[in-house]
Amino acid sequence: MNQPESNQSKNNKVKQLIAGEFEVSQCNEWIAVTNPATQEVICETPCTTMDEMERALESAKTAFTTWKDTPVPVRARVMLQYQALLKEHHDELATILAQETGKTFDDAKGDVWRGIEVAEHACNISSMMMGETVENVARAIDTYSYTQPLGVCAGITPFNFPAMIPLWMFPLAIACGNTFILKPSEQCPNTPTRLAELLIEAGLPQGVLQVVHGRKEQVDFLLTHEDIKTISFVGSVAVGQYIYKTGTDNLKRVQSFAGAKNHMVVMPDAQKKQVVNSLVGASCGAAGQRCMAISVAVLVGEAQEWADDIKNAIAEIRPGAWDDKDAAYGPLISPQAKERVLGLIQQGKDDGATCMLDGSDCTVEGFPDGNWVGPTVFTDVTSEMSIYREEVFGPVLCLVKADTLEEAIAIINDSPYGNGTSIFTASGAAARRFQHEIEVGQVGINVPIPVPLPFFSFTGWKKSFYGDHHAYGKQAIRFFTETKTITARWFDSDIPSALNMTIDLK
Ligand code: NAD
């Protein structure tokens, strides 16, 4: 694997970052990371021991005592340098990411780029941390507030965006003056390791960022330890619910971004070509392994006649290895993920949906062992079927029918998920009604995947998000900081009695 020596030891054991040093864990349990196109073992992820977790936490606590007092412009300058380094290493990061996820190189570059944008946003930390003031709340008394960091924050991230999602979390938390412990996905450890190396190269002091590895045991340490102030999680619904419940039971601030099932409404007045092109990429891009993938198209009225055009366009794309320039997307992350998707496709057929395009028997020349699933399209899908209800996380699109916009909105609002949705229409009235009535957090109008930039927030609803503040973007500052309000008297005068709860009534 084309990767800097410092990421791994000679025998491809992924290193962890504790107290400013990349070190080999003393653990007994290692998780094999395989190339999803070949099953070749790329490296092994450690399951950080509990002693090592304690050391990581101690290091983060110690670093907090000085990092919180590091001037805000100095913290911003580290992020400026980091943004520059991430851009300089964009292709290298995308190569590492593509090799461990199987994503195509261009898609991997997009994953890294969406993360760079968050680091860029963190450069603006000085203005984001500004407090508020009111002069003369009483005679000669002013009140003002400061935004202060919390302490040690932790992040637990999924396999499908190993650059973007860790970068949603630690640059903003750290720029706010916190220290951070990252537990990335055990399936894709190399990209976050390289991200950490570059942050240290950008001048981050020792101990401000720690990277530990593993699974439930390591996550439980973070969820239950009283010295960890916040938990940021992105991953599946079942784990997301567990994280939210356990973290809040341990009286922590938790934001938990979970799974999804996103619908696109296609109105008959939409531009057919735009609809078809958008559906190809939004359903099958990244092999459907995106929390914002469109997995259901709701065809309204005469748009139902476009089913064959949609199927024919999707039939033209094919998967391939990360460096195959003609591949539309890569393999699924693991043989288990492939088995699961194939099982759902079979269940869809058994439940009576019509499989217009079946990607179950997909092969890619030269890669007989890859986790390939070809593009798949179902029609005659109903809301009781598991292919409709469950998050498939594969290149599978379901077509459902609605007679009216009202019916389409009702179908979507009935879904337990609320991450993203979109409408394609030429009608302003239809789009306005949709944006107003739809119970989903991120809405696209003639935009298939409406992911906002970091100066907004990533705002999933319902089963797609548990918590009070959204991790990335604007509200992240509220999540990673506390507000301190000061009321000050600036010169000597008689101090009124505090007995009646007022300072100065006149
Ligand atoms: P996952 O839930 O299996 O794993 C996520 C993280 O949780 C990993 O770091 C993993 O090690 C850890 N983990 C797994 N099992 C655990 C357990 N029992 N206890 C504690 N920690 C555990 O998710 P994944 O398969 O890596 O990622 C895919 C999922 O993430 C999909 O459901 C997708 O929709 C979701 N996702 C959501 C968003 C969003 O913004 N809402 C973004 C990306 C991905």
Image (tube, helix red, strand yellow):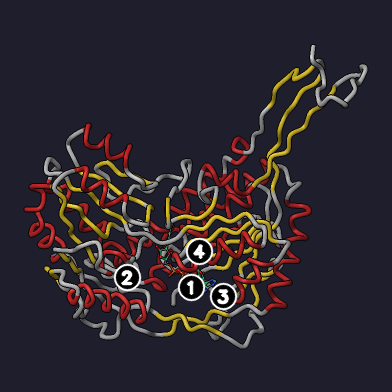
Residue 216, numbered circle: 3
**Label 4's element?**
helix
Which residue has dot 1 on it?
3
Closer to the camera: disc 2 or disc 3? 3
Q: Which residue is mark 4?
A: 241
Which of the two discs, 2 and 3, labels the residue nearer the N terminus? 3
Distance from the alpha carbon under mark 3 to that under mark 4: 14 Å
Distance from disc 2 to disc 4, alpha carbons, whole Å, reads 33 Å
Which residue type carries mark 2? Answer: Trp
Query: What's the distance in space between the residues labelled 1 and 2, CA to CA?
Result: 16 Å
Q: Are marks 3 and 4 in contact (CB under 8 Å)?
A: no
Q: Position of residue 107 (x, y in %)?
A: 34, 60
| Residue 402, horizontal then vertical, whole percent | 16, 50
Q: Amino acid at mark 1?
A: Gln
Q: Is residue 17 above or below residue 175?
A: below
Q: Earlier in the sequence, mark 1 or mark 4?
A: 1
Other residues around mark 4 within 10 Å, as few (<14) / some (14–19) / many (≥20): some
Q: Earlier in the sequence, mark 2 or mark 4?
A: 4
The residue carrying pointer 3 sits among few (fewer than 14), some (14 to 19) or many (20 or more) residues within 10 Å by Cα, namely few
Q: Dot 1, how many residues are within 10 Å of its Cα: few (below 14), some (14-19), or many (20+)?
A: some
Q: Say which residue label 2 marks.
A: 322
Q: Nearer the viewer, mark 1 or mark 2?
A: 2
Label 3 – label 1 distance at C-alpha: 28 Å
The kind of residue tagged 3 is Lys
Mark-to-mark CA distance, 2 and 3:
30 Å
Ranked by sequence position, the earlier of labels 3 and 1 is: 1
CA–CA distance in space, label 1 to label 4? 35 Å
User: Is the residue marked 4 within 8 Å of ligand 1, measured from its CB?
Assistant: no
